[in-house]
Each structure stands twice: as C-alpha cells, then as structure tokens.
Image: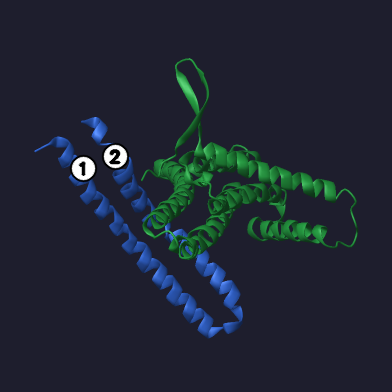
Amino acid sequence: MDFTNQNLAVLFEFGGTTIYLTQTLLATWIVMGVLIVFAIVVRIKLSKFKAIPTGFQNVVEIMVEAMDHFTINTMGESYRHYGAFFFGMFAFIISANYSGMLGLRPPTADLATTGSLAITIFLITHATGIKRMKLGYLKGFVQPNVIFLPINLIGEVSNLLSLCFRLFGNMLGGVIILGLAYQMFPFLLGFVLPSVLHAYFDVFAGMLQAFIFTVLSMTFIVQKGSKK
Amino acid sequence: MDPKAFILGCSAIAAGLASLSGLGSGLGQGIAAGKAAEAVGRQPEAKGDITSTMLIGCALAETCSIYGLIIALILLLNNPLIGLL
C-alpha cells in the first residue's frame, strides 16, 4: 500500500512543471471551508448581542473565555492579545486532525503543513523578541559566554524541527496503522473493530497533539520575549 | 550479489534497529506515570491537575521515539538510497 500523498488531478501547468491537486490540498480546502462557514454562522447569529448570554452565544463565549484564561495563565497579562491568534491556530490543527475520521487524509500528515505552521511560530517568536527587547535580543544569543553562540543557534533550529516533526510523526503513524487495519480485517469486522483505533489515534492523539503544539509555541514566545 | 537487493536488505535491518528508540519513550513515560500515581496517592483532590500534567509530559517524552519511527518509515516506504545507485 502507498501511504504517501497521492495526486488526484492536474490543476494547471506552466513552464515545464505541473501543479497537481493532491489529497492534502483537497483536505485542507475542506477544513478551511468548514471553519469559514462556522465563522460566518457565528457572525450572523450573534449580530444581536445579548448582555446575558443564552444558547449558542453561551457556547461561543465559553470557548473564547477558556482560551483567554488559558493564555493569561500560560503567557502572562502582557501577551493577552496573542490569544486570538492561538485560538485560530488551535482550531485549524484540531479540525485538520479530526478530518481523518471523515475519510480524508489529514493535512497534518503532510510535512508541508506542519512545516509551515512551525515556520510561522518561529517567525513570530523572533519578531516578538526583537520588538520587545530591541537590540538586547541579540545579546541573548551570547549568554552566558560567546562560546555558546553555536549551541544557542542549534537550540533555535531544534525547537522548530521538534514542533514540526512531533505533529507530523503522530499523524502519519495514525494514518499508516489505520490503513493497515482496514486492509487486514475482514469486511464485516471493518465496521466495528477499527473504532477502537480511531478513538485512540484520531480522537485522543489529535486533541493532545494540537494542545501540545499550542502550549509549546506559547512557552517559546514567552521565553524569547522576557528580560532576564 | 545484486546491489539493489543488498541495499534493500540492509534498509530493512536499519528500519528494525531504528524502531528500538521506542525503548526510551516506554521507560520515560512509565516513570512519569509512576510518579503521577504516587502524587495522586498523596493528595487525591488534585487528581485532575496531576492527570493533565502527566499527559503533557508523556506527549513531550514521546517525541524522540517518533523521530526513530520516521526514520524507519522513510527507509521502508520511500527509500532514498536506491536512487543513489
């Protein structure tokens, strides 16, 4: 069986190269569509804002308040506005991980998606450090001694790589084990037994890895931005 | 001996050796769970906090065995050494 990203159709060609529609691209568009539709529904249903929330508004306010409290607990009061960005990123990662239960190949099982998320966090980390500490930020690389400069640089790169590979490896492992399970079980048992594997690899590991990605990104940003 | 068969055979052995990295994560997560059980025994009211802290620690300790799994998967599914023949 082939567990790599399959090409489904040709999108367009220019020069000598062709751009294909791959399984990852299709799954990413579907996840994006679901999240955008949810956001538009929230905007339309909550255009009349009640002071004491009931029903749907209550649920949305619970989610936003939970993220707000969590951001303040993890990062401190001065980073409160970062909670909005991390809520969007957490929603994308958890929707992408759960799309494996709907028959799609999860987009986070592709190194491109997790790599781009990790690169985004990398750029935000260093931009926060430069903005908050100006030029004292570069001094952090030669603490405690100039000899430590290559070790600190390798530490930066290893943070980025570990974020990226942790999510990729967990999701790809789930894809492979479930693919083998559906192939090995006889047809009627395939409706019953793989649900246990889905419960662990998709539901539990998907939620845990999305949460770990968010918590680690917050910790990296706080470490870089604080004065020692 | 056929060079391609030799490379594929050695890749299979290497994939098996790379999976031995699971030993480290099994040991580390077992120790973490043991300490968590001890802490719950000492203070049963804090069970929720202890459980979530233990899960975060286990997911972080899992990372290094995932690196080994990725190397084994690359060698088995998309072997880059064949193209260098």
Horizontal and vertical percent position of residue A51? 91, 59
Chain of the residue that carries numbered disc 1 in the rendered image? B
Q: Name the residue beneath numbered marker 2.
A: B79
Asked whether the residues under the numbered discs 1 and 2 touch, taking CB atoms below 8 Å apart as contact, a structural biologist would say yes
Q: Name the residue beneath numbered marker 1.
A: B8
Residue kind at label 1, given as amino acid type: Leu
**Where B30 sits versus A84, above or below?**
below
Could you tell me which secondary element the residue under label 2 belongs to? loop
Residue in front for this viewpoint, A41 or B52: A41
Q: Residue at x 34, y 52 (%)?
A: B68
Chain letter for blue?
Answer: B
Real-space Cα separation, disc 1 to disc 2, in angstroms: 8 Å
* Quadrant the N terminus of chain B occupies: top left
Chain letter for green?
Answer: A
Horizontal and vertical percent position of residue B11? 23, 45
Chain of the residue that carries numbered disc 2 in the rendered image? B
**Where A226 sits versus A135, above or below?**
below
Q: Which mark is residue A117?
A: none
